[in-house]
Image (tube, helix red, strand yellow):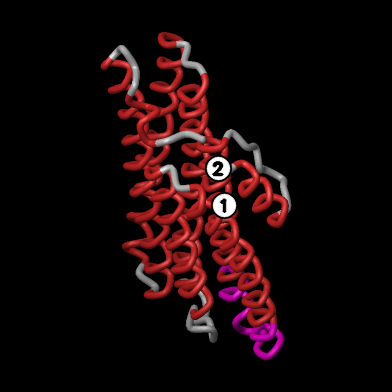
Amino acid sequence: MIEQETYKQHISTQFNAELEGVKNSLLEMGGNVERQVNDAVDCLVKMDTGQAEVVIDRDHAVNQMEVSIDEECSRILARRQPAASDLRLVLTVTKITTDLERIGDEAAKIARQCIRISEAAASPSNYVEIKHIGNYVVGMLQKALDAFARLDVELAVEVVKADKTVDKEYRSAMRSLVTFMMEDPRVIGSVLNEMWALKSLERVGDHTSNIAEHVIYLVRGLDVRHVELEELISQVEESH
């Protein structure tokens, strides 16, 4: 098991600074992506196309942060040739940045749906499902980033569990939207765009769950990708 202090025992203070630097850069990127998702949901619920354009424009900055962090991780691997827990940290950072970048992409997609929906008939749903699931996945992302910052396996497991709830809520919301389209064909266009936005939120949940799984790998050395939830919990408990 990796403890917080593991990363502070290097002879080279510069190496310590480099590791702390990529961790902090990752958390900064995570904060930006969290804001992207929150703002994307907000602009859709409020039909604020101006804010939607801002979300789309900011996606470029998120992409650039991914490139910058990956470059720094590559330099650390080349110069320091880290082993054991340090190697796991660098590899985990590169994996999490990939998921964060993809979450940023999904936020931009939601913002684009906002613009498309604004040009069609108003949705009869009042975007209740969008708001509910959006708030839920933003909370998941906050927990996943906290789990990384604190090396908290239990919190990471909570995030993986929460993704099952997102999947359930998503299926329920889709059934509700299909009913709206059947009752009034005039809203088919706007409801279809709303469905695409919901799909993006479901994908945000998936990527956030991936981040939590990467944290479990970092702390316990367990690769729990593609493992059923019950087996994941069992492996984590056994490794404690």
Mark 1 or mark 2, earlier in chain? 1
Q: Nearer the viewer, residue 40 or 155?
A: 155
Counting from the top left corner in percent of width and height, residue 173 is at 62, 76
Q: Nearer the viewer, residue 211 or 107?
A: 211
Q: In the rendered picture of this protein, how many numbered marks are placed on residues?
A: 2
Counting from the top left corner in percent of width and height, residue 105 is at 49, 48
Between the C-alphas of marks 1 and 2, the distance is 11 Å
Q: Nearer the viewer, residue 156 or 185?
A: 156
Numbered mark located on residue 209 in the image: 1
Depicted 171 relative to depicted 97: above or below: below
Magenta span: 179-193
Counting from the top left corner in percent of width and height, residue 28 is at 32, 42
Badge 1 amino acid: Ser
Q: Is residue 152 left or right of residue 197?
A: left
Numbered mark located on residue 227 in the image: none
Badge 2 amino acid: Ile
Q: Quadrant of the C terminus?
A: top right
Mark 1 vs mark 2, foreground winner is 2
Residue 187 placement: quadrant: bottom right
Q: Tag 1: Cα neighbours inside 10 Å, few (<14), some, or many (≥20)?
A: many
At horizontal 44% and vertical 48% (from top left) the residue drawn is 147
Counting from the top left corner in percent of width and height, residue 51 is at 32, 62
Depicted 212 relative to depicted 176: above or below: above
Q: Furthest-bottom residue in view?
A: 183
At horizontal 64% and vertical 85% (from top left) the residue drawn is 180
- Residue pointed to by mark 2: 216
At mark 1, the secondary structure is: helix
Q: Magenta span: helix, strand or loop, mainly?
A: helix
Check if residue 136 falls in the magenta segment.
Answer: no
Q: Tag 2: Cα neighbours inside 10 Å, few (<14), some, or many (≥20)?
A: many
At horizontal 51% and vertical 75% (from top left) the residue drawn is 120
At mark 2, the secondary structure is: helix
